[in-house]
Amino acid sequence: MFHLLFPFEYVDSVFSIDYDKLFQKGYKGVIFDIDMTLVPHGADSTKEIDELFKTIHKAGLQTLLLTNNSEERVKRFIKNIDTLYLCDANKPDKDGYVKAIEMMGIRKNEAVFIGDQIFIDIYGANKSGIASILVKYVTAEIETNIGIRRNLEKVILALYRFTKIYQHRLGDIIKTG
């Protein structure tokens, strides 16, 4: 059971990932969570995120936003980003992840999911058969209350670090320099 909570990789941020290396390893699509993965909760996209999506597309990868948010929220977020999206996905239910793969026209083993929550994002991707990358969550400077779920995630991450067999299952995909 715990293995479904362990990400294939754990990185500082979406900017820590070498998307060219993901493409070279045979991945064709990157599925992202939005809130606290790409931006603080409810925030609009930034110039850096807009540029990141352009970089990912130049690497040859498709992108899709898989979120439990409303379409209104997503449309506001992607005003400068060309990407597919799936709203009201009911993560961690498998159906949203499977639909995302279908929308991208790829197989599960050609996709990687990137999110900030173990019990929703990582668990959903793993039980759907999609490789997962956990990023440290993005918060606004004024946010201080992380909640009980984040404290439980700390316990899971301690087990993850102890159980080295589940770490770095994507190989060398972290940017250097």
Image: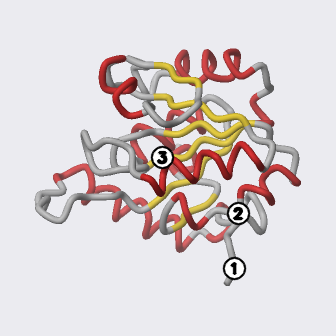
On screen, residue 106 versus residue 89, left or right, reads right
* Among numbered discs 2 and 3, the one appearing first in the sequence: 2
Amino acid type shown at disc 1:
Thr
Question: Residue at the spot x=55%, y=46% of the render?
Answer: 114
Amino acid type shown at disc 3:
Gly
Could you say which is closer to the camera, residue 175 or residue 127? 175
On screen, residue 54 versus residue 46, left or right, reads right
Could you say which is closer to the camera, residue 124 or residue 101? 101
**Contact? badges 1 and 2 (CB < 8 Å):** yes
Label 1 Cα crowd, 10 Å radius (few <14 / some 14-19 / many 20+)? few
Image position, residue 170 (x, y; %): 75, 58
Q: Secondary structure at mark 1?
A: loop
On screen, residue 96 versus residue 154, left or right, reads right
Whole-number angstrom distance, CA of label 2 to CA of label 3: 16 Å
On screen, residue 38 versus residue 98, left or right, reads left
Q: Secondary structure at mark 3?
A: strand
Question: Residue at the spot x=42%, y=26% of the render?
Answer: 91
Which numbered disc covers residue 18?
2
Label 3 Cα crowd, 10 Å radius (few <14 / some 14-19 / many 20+)? many
Which residue bears the numbered disc 1?
176
Which residue bears the numbered disc 3?
115
Amino acid type shown at disc 2:
Asp
* Among numbered discs 1 and 2, the one appearing first in the sequence: 2
Quadrant showing the C terminus? bottom right
Q: Nearer the viewer, mark 1 or mark 3?
A: 1
Q: Secondary structure at mark 2?
A: loop
Q: Is residue 75 above or below residue 81?
A: above
Q: Nearer the viewer, mark 2 or mark 3?
A: 2
Image position, residue 127 (x, y; %): 59, 32
